[in-house]
Amino acid sequence: MGKGGFQCPYCGVGCGLVSVRVNGNGKTPLVDEVIPTPLKVRADKNHPANRGLICLKGVTIPQTLDKNRLTEVLYREDIESSFKRISWEEAYNLLAEKFKSLSPEEVYFYISGQLTTEDSYVINKFAKGFLKTNNIDANSRLCMASAVVAYKKAFGSDGPPCSYDDLEDADVFLFIGSNAAVAHPVLFNRIQRSRKPDTVVVTVDPVETETVKKSDFFININAGTDTVLLNSVLHLLYKKGWIDWDFVKNYTEGFEKALEEASKYPPHVAAKICGIRERDIELLAYLFANAKKLVSFWSMGLNQSVNGVAKNLALINLHLATGRLGDRGCPFSLTGQPNAMGGREVGYLTNGLPGYRDVSNERDRREIETLWGVKGINPKPGAVITDAIDLMLEGRIKLLWVVGTNPAITLPRLDKVWRALERVFLVVNEAYADADTLKFANLVFPAQVVPEKEGVMTSSDKTLTFINRQVEPPPNTKPDWLIFTEFAQRLGGEKLFPYRDRGEIFEEFKKTTKERLCDISAFDERDLPKRWGGKHLYRQGEGWKFKTESGKAKFHPTPWEVADVDKDLWRERGLENLLEEDEFILTTGRLKNQWHTMTKTGKSELLMKTELPPFAVMHPKDAAALGLSEWDVIRITDGEREIYRVLFLRRIKRKHIFTYFGYPLWYTDTPTNLLLEDRTDPLSREPDLKFRRVRVEFVEKFPLGEG
Ligand code: SF4
């Protein structure tokens, strides 16, 4: 990696980037100089994640750094009043008084996969080690919680078994519930670049996405039915005699029960439920059986579901049944955020502790208590964020501290969320003055973003990258680890939070990983990027040893669950015949040039140039049946809440309607998650943000040419 580079702060691909200083005539780039003016960035050709590739979001990072930044600490007693500027000292004192008046369980922290490892580590230690509350969750709950649970159930740990080194020599790639061409573009481009004549790319999606357009095969599936499809493939593999019995017998357990569940979905049954052809199922079974190396990728399409863990496990079952691990393939969960993996390492969800430990495990607690020099870490996992919203509405959580995320747009049931945010004393660490959550804030700390601050992040494939500071941060801003360190010291935590600089935090964190799966204790941050766990985690000699009690990977039965629609009627009639003419399944996803709630990417003129007004997509035949045309403004409603979108017609599964999940309030009054329910997968507690039965109706013609 080029000296002095940094990791892109957007998606989990974790691209290495470097700064370029433009000389006097604007032509000769001098690479790797720190604090260049003006900042320009390009890909690091030596970084293992991207090998010289970059996407438009990465290129435009500099355009997002200097607009609408917060540079003052702001306070107001209640949200009807205006903010006034106060000093850091005043803010810490005021907040310390608040904390002293509350019990630990009345306080809640909601943090982010966009923070550095050092930021997350300090905040997690502050909550779990100092206050002794596990009331801390991260936006990763909305992102990869289902993948974490599934990996743990199948492999005994949520360490992904694969790496980016698995990309170039695979001949079959399966994208399911992932629009990687848009959400993880550099990874997708790496695959496109290394394509050989016999490479096959298959995408399973309800929508004809960018990924679909560049695939060889498109399985246009009904939303919410991935478990059915994958069960059916397992059933067919068995029927065809395509199970890798050597692998199954030597390295796995539980196959029979998984097969029993799968056999409820023979291809003719599954095809009807999924709205696909039987030969789509045969294609997948054939590829799993006959590929040289098959890598499957997934992200929110599998994770954000009431059936999220089962969807993940059903896919992993196929890899186990065909021995597709290591040099023969891998199931690869793509993390949405740049440091979701670092968050896993520091254990920043409600149940985690550093070094892939769990609060409910006594030995894990004792080890961390010894390392931190504390006693009494709470053994009970804290409330997940959707439950915490209810507790706020009941008045049982009174103070919420949000760090580096925008729950006023991203959480489901926004009507409830907004009421909850109004009810609590809301503290927000935020870099941008127009972030939606600030509308509800009482106290705002001006924060720094990458690449204004140093730190470490971990990509989807477990590679740690050091972020060298590239530009001076705006005046009067601080990194999140420093805000929490200073505040903890104010509360009497000098001994636990003695840090004089970020490097001391990273060194302390490293110790918590010693002899753990994610052991980075011997890593020197000057040698990053570096991956933990090797190319293939769990590989032992010629065989496999997993982190389960028996050392074998586990199959799991994966029953199909879905909300809003009667499963038996669906199985009998098919989805299309169940819904009335104006009824649709709402599903959500990404925009090509925007990232999450547009707080950063929305500030780039280049990225905004091609943005349409907030829109939704439906199939032309469904639109015709309702008398709708392109550029009609439509109302999408569940009967209680509604959103408004401009209609476009595209190839999408019949009776489905798609919109972007992250439209902020400055772009529309009706963000998408007003309509999404706060129901969750029972195991991962990840909300279902991809499936909602709604009605659609015409409102007016969009006023083209005006304004
Ligand atoms: Fe950044 Fe992801 Fe684009 Fe890489 S692919 S430059 S990590 S947004």
Image (cartoon, rainbow, N blue to C red):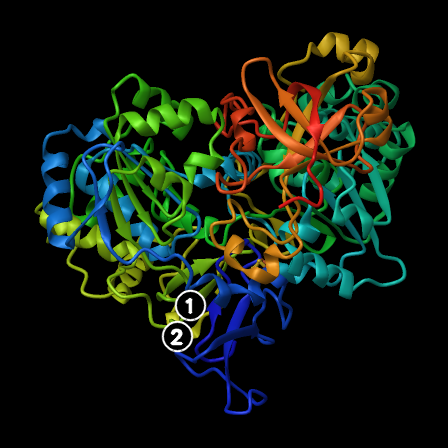
Q: Is residue 35 above or below residue 253?
A: below
Out of 222 and 173, give the one closest to the viewer: 222
Mark 2 lies on residue: 526
- If you read the primary sequence from the N terminus, does the residue marked by circle 1 or circle 2 appear first? 1
Is 666 left, or right, of 223 in this rendering?
Answer: left
Q: Would you place residue 426 above or below residue 227 in this image?
A: below
Q: Secondary structure at mark 2?
A: helix
Q: Which mark is residue 6?
A: none
Q: Is residue 495 visible?
A: no
Residue 621: x and y in percent read: 87, 27
Q: Position of residue 609 (x, y in %)?
A: 63, 57
Seen from this angle, which residue lies furthest front?
706
**Type of amino acid under label 2:** Arg
Closer to us: 327 or 36? 36
- Asked if labels 2 and 1 touch by Cβ distance under 8 angstroms, the answer is yes
Q: Is residue 159 left or right of residue 427?
A: right
Between residue 622 and residue 340, name the one nearer to us.
622
Residue 97: quarter of image? top left
> In the figure, residue 79 lies in which quadrant?
top left
Quick one: label 1, few (<14), some, or many (20+) residues within 10 Å? many
Please give left or right for residue 89 compared with residue 41 in the image.
left
Q: Which disc number belongs to residue 466? A: 1
